[in-house]
Image (cartoon, rainbow, N blue to C red):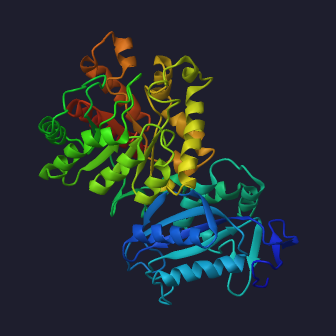
Amino acid sequence: MKSCGATCVSLLHSSTGIPVEVHSQDQEVVIALGSNVGNRIHNFNEALRLMKKSGIHITRHGCLYETEPVYLTDQALFLNSAVRGITKLGPHELLGVLKKIERDMGRTDGIRYGPRPIDLDIVFYGKFSVKSEILTIPHERVWERPFVMAPLMDVIGSAIESDTAASWHSFSKHTGGLFESWEKLGGESLVGTNGLKRVLPIGNLLWDWSQKTSVMGILNLTPDSFSDGGKFQSVEAAVSQVRLMISEGADIIDLGAQSTRPMASRLSAQEELDRLIPVLDAVLKMPEVEGKLLSVDTFHSEVASEAIGKGAHIVNDVSSGQLDSNMLDVVASLNVPYVAMHMKGNPSTMQNSENLQYDNVCEQVASELYSRVREAELSGIPAWRIIIDPGIGFSKNTEHNLDILMGLPHIRTELAGKSLALSHAPMLIGPSRKRFLGDICARPAGADRDSASIAAVTAGVLGSANIVRVHNVKDNLDAVKLCDAMVKRKRSRA
């Protein structure tokens, strides 16, 4: 095959081995990323920015993996992932672009398999195989590398949804395609062991959410929240509550200045900021918050931007970008984790009859949540920064909430058909003191629903939830610890 410019014709071989002419039309590609020098997260962010600038439209992201080095083992841990995208560049043009990005980011000709600030490899290019003096596609060693295969499977998904994806499977040495190749390596059992763990970047830190379930303590700064409205409106009361929740074991504090209870009135971004920022400023000065994470519960992009600029770490958006058209672009620019929650309508309309219609609530929540997260990815929020939330109590009735609590694994399975990366994402649930618990247990007052909340949290953690958002940190933490111990014991016997 010859190298060519953007307007020439290039001879490639299809997955069936038949020579074909490929004009400079859109081709779907998979590119693997690796880094183990300098600020690895920054390196990934910069590589993605430069790829987009160079004519590679990124459509999907794998999970982020921290991995032990192979071949040359005396070096720092790597970060690895993969992206799927569309480009008009020919294969050798694409190679040239990626090599230029590597050079511009400081990579030099050093030891093979040695340390590098960024490594960008073409894994697949359209339906075609390429073999020249400088380029081989599929990448010749992909089949033996778990740190490539894991994120590759993430961007492909568990269902074969296109002819191009089918061709990628046909390149595998196994009759079962890439699925069988991954399983032969060890598959999902490798993750968390053998120097391969999924991580979510928060600032310059990497969070391995598989180690334990995280407890998110709720701080409502509103006068009308259903459970504790008006209790923490003063800065002093809010700081005291944060101190209490941290002393009881909270990992994350979620600050919300906008009520999202059913029929809640909607504040402007400025009104929300006026409530939030004095408390956030005070909380950030507390010595107790060192090592803890702060989340801002908002659907306003202006509030998210201001809070993150002040020092918050996570944006928790009940609307998944549907209530502010700027939210996804803003979060993408902030490079922070983003909680995308399922909800139909808005807090004023979510419990209307038309928003409570489901044939199968778990399947529809998964499908609709996937659509929202796809919009987030296309806006530049990588899958490795996304936390999913099925939205218990939001556009759901009692039966729907029960189905979700019992069906979290089913939601993950449905997501896996479209994106394994999203099916592996951290999952947050927030059943705490919700009305359906009061309806079932005849507890009309929200503060009387803690026992039911603990039961719901227990079901969620045993069903694969990774973060639980609660009012009563102390008692829920005990439940979470027991659930984690049971899950760990079950895995050890598998």
Observer-nearest residue: 174 or 206?
A: 206
Question: For the point 45% across and 61% down, which residue is it?
Answer: 65
Q: In the image, is 296 to the left or to the right of 101?
A: left
Q: Position of residue 230 (x, y in %)?
A: 21, 26
Observer-nearest residue: 209 or 100?
A: 100
Query: Does the rendering let one see residue 183?
Result: no
Outermost residue on the top side: it is 442
Q: Position of residue 8 (x, y in %)?
A: 81, 80
Is 389 placed above or below 444 here? below
Outermost residue on the bottom side: it is 109
Question: For the N terminus, which image quadrant?
Answer: bottom right
Is 187 placed above or below 108 here? above
Q: Position of residue 401 (x, y in %)?
A: 46, 23
Question: For the C terminus, which image quadrant?
Answer: top left
Q: Position of residue 138 (x, y in %)?
A: 69, 71
Question: For the point 43% across and 25% down, which residue is it?
Answer: 393
Q: In the image, is 206 to the left or to the right of 69?
A: left
Observer-nearest residue: 203 or 165?
A: 203
